[in-house]
Image: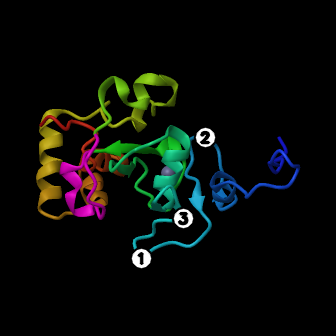
Amino acid sequence: MRFQRPTGPDGRFLPVSPERRFWKRVDKQGPEECWNWLGAKDKDGYGVFRAFKESRAHRVSYILWRGEIGASLVCHACDNPSCVNPVHLFLGSHQDNASDRQSKGRYDSIRGEKHYTHKSPEKRMRGSKHGNSILNEDTVLLIKGRLAQGDRGIDIASDLGLTKSHVSLIKCGKAWSWL
Ligand SMILES: [Zn+2]
């Protein structure tokens, strides 16, 4: 589908929307793959894009895809900070990630039936990619303990024979947050 630049009632061109500017900077791949940010990145490897009072590209991507997120943290299931594929992004817990956060707004948790995976089950990661499928409580507690000690997610994952996505999900408080 060809993009048609929007025009106002008088026929003059309107400013190009943030959405249009955003997707021009994304290396779009298949739906399951990482979509890397082609524009500027910050020191942590996150894409930089200013829109909707946000400055990180993955947060803007999530907002474009799902709407308002308030002050919630947007986590990467793929552990790739420059990825902006909305399917790889999910809202994480503020409490488990206080150190990652810079803004001080009120934390609005979107969980349970409000979370997009419940509204759109087809968007869930499936099988071995899904964090809950092969983890048990002992493993999760072990991972949480090691994360608390400052171990890197990728090291823990390789020690336990897990993908780093599993560890990342726990780190972000999405999976097993009740433990
Ligand atoms: Zn990704």
Query: Of the residues shown, which amino acid type is indicated by label 2?
Result: Pro
Instruction: Characterize the local packing of mark 3: few (<14), some (14-19) or many (20 or more) Cα atoms within 10 angstroms.
Output: many
Q: x, y (%) of residue 18? A: 63, 56
User: Measuring 26% from the left and 59% from the top, which residue is drawn there?
Assistant: 104
Q: Is residue 21 found left or right of 114 in the rendered image?
A: right
**Front residue (pair 143, 1):** 1
Read off the residue under disc 1: 43
Q: Is mark 3 within 8 Å of ligand 1?
A: no
Residues rendered magenta in the picture: 93-108
Helix, strand or loop status at disc 2: loop
Q: How is the image coloured?
A: rainbow
Read off the residue under disc 3: 49
> Alpha carbon of mark 3 to alpha carbon of mark 2: how far?
22 Å
Q: Is residue 68 above or below residue 122?
A: below
Helix, strand or loop status at disc 1: loop
Q: Is residue 72 above or below residue 38?
A: above
Q: Nearer the viewer, mark 3 or mark 1?
A: 3
The disc at residue 31 is 2
* Number of marks in the rendered image: 3
Which residue reaches farthest front?
A: 10
- Tag 3 and tag 2, C-beta contact below 8 Å: no
Instruction: Characterize the local packing of mark 1: few (<14), some (14-19) or many (20 or more) Cα atoms within 10 angstroms.
Output: few
> Is tag 3's residue or tag 2's residue first in the polypeptide sequence?
2
> Is tag 3's residue or tag 1's residue first in the polypeptide sequence?
1
